[in-house]
Amino acid sequence: MIIDKDLYERIRKKREELDGLRPFPKSVLERLRKQFAIELAYNSNAIEGNTLTLRETRLVIEEGITIKGKPLREHFEAINHQKAFEFLESLPKKTALTEQVIKDIHKPIMRGIDDEYAGRYRDVNVRILGAVKSPPRFEKIPVKMREYVKYVKRNPDKLNPIELSAIIHYRLVEIHPFTDGNGRCARLLMNLFLMRQGCPVTMVLKVDRKKYYDRLRKADKGDLKPFVDFIGRNVERSLDLYLDTFKRGSEYISLAEAAEGSPYSQEYLSLLARKGRLESIKLGRNWFVKKEAIKRYIKSKKK
Ligand SMILES: Nc1ncnc2c1ncn2[C@@H]1O[C@H](COP(=O)(O)OP(=O)(O)O)[C@@H](O)[C@H]1O
Ligand SMILES: [Mg+2]
């Protein structure tokens, strides 16, 4: 086993625990998924140099707003990432990993930015900024990619699902089949595999860029463990966030739902949430509360 044993054991248990909480309340799940998609777009794009903030990324994706002073390309990248993510979600669960699927993920990422190379393997040699090792010469890509897809399908090293997802990411950026957008494509592909095993969206955070590059360099030298563990910890963080939201007896509900069984209107609850007088969380643009929190608030008012 490559991944840290304790870490893997914790992930396994948390996944089981999360499974036990299904079905999730629809409104909260929807909001959480949207939130994660936007956070993934923000982090994945920021890692490759996009300067939009999380808030700006949301505005561009959800409202189609143009951010003053930010290049058109960065707007495209935000929207494109969302499109690519929606494509992932639209894939039937049993779709096998083929080179075409990888190209189909890459295509929307580069649309309007480099249409010539969107969804097409490179026919030039490239270097990776910040890497020591050079990716293979372009003539080798077709063979390398054929081997890559075969490896993932057969899983000859008997990797567990978390390890395999991390290796799917690493091997793709190692081959670097595209002129640009390899990192974003690899992070999405990794998520395709994670989501299929019931894991929430997993992000490499912008703030972890240095660590991420360091772990990739170690992998280049043949030591895959630091990268696999790094991805594993990110999987665990996403699981924690989901568990926190969905744990039994502490489900978050929308303010509309909360208002129904309480003496307050949705508008009033929203005011309380915004003022911080009611324990609540904001997902996207909407507030969510736990039933318990409403009860506590009512009690406190009676006193
Ligand atoms: N030392 C390395 N070895 C392998 N891959 C690396 C290394 N350093 C960085 N990378 C990968 O290369 C990506 C950058 O390649 P690029 O094609 O520009 O993708 P993107 O534009 O999506 O960031 C990084 O996001 C990372 O995944
Ligand atoms: Mg790039």
Image (cartoon, rainbow, N blue to C red):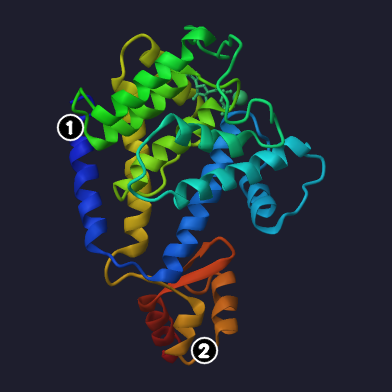
Count of marks overlaid on the render? 2
Residue pictured at 78% horizontal, 49% vertical: 66
Residue found at x 30% / y 51%: 198
Q: Report the side of 153 relative to 301 (left or right).
A: left
Does residue 100 appear left or right of residue 18 in this picture? right
Q: Can residue 275 be seen in this view?
A: no
**Marking on residue 5:** 1
- Rendered location of residue 156, percent (x, y): 21, 23
Query: Outermost residue toward the right?
Result: 69
Label 1: few (<14), some or many (≥20) within 10 Å? Answer: few
Res 73 → quadrant: top right
- In the rendered image, which residue does mark 2 sit on? 264
Quadrant (top left/top right/bottom left/bottom right) for the N terminus? top left
Which residue is rendered at x = 39% and y = 12% of the image?
A: 220
Residue 130, compared with residue 148, is above or below; it is: above
For residue 145, what is the image quadrant? top left
Location of residue 28 with respect to 122 vertically, above or below: below
The mark nearer the N terminus, 2 or 1, is 1
Quarter holding the C terminus is bottom left
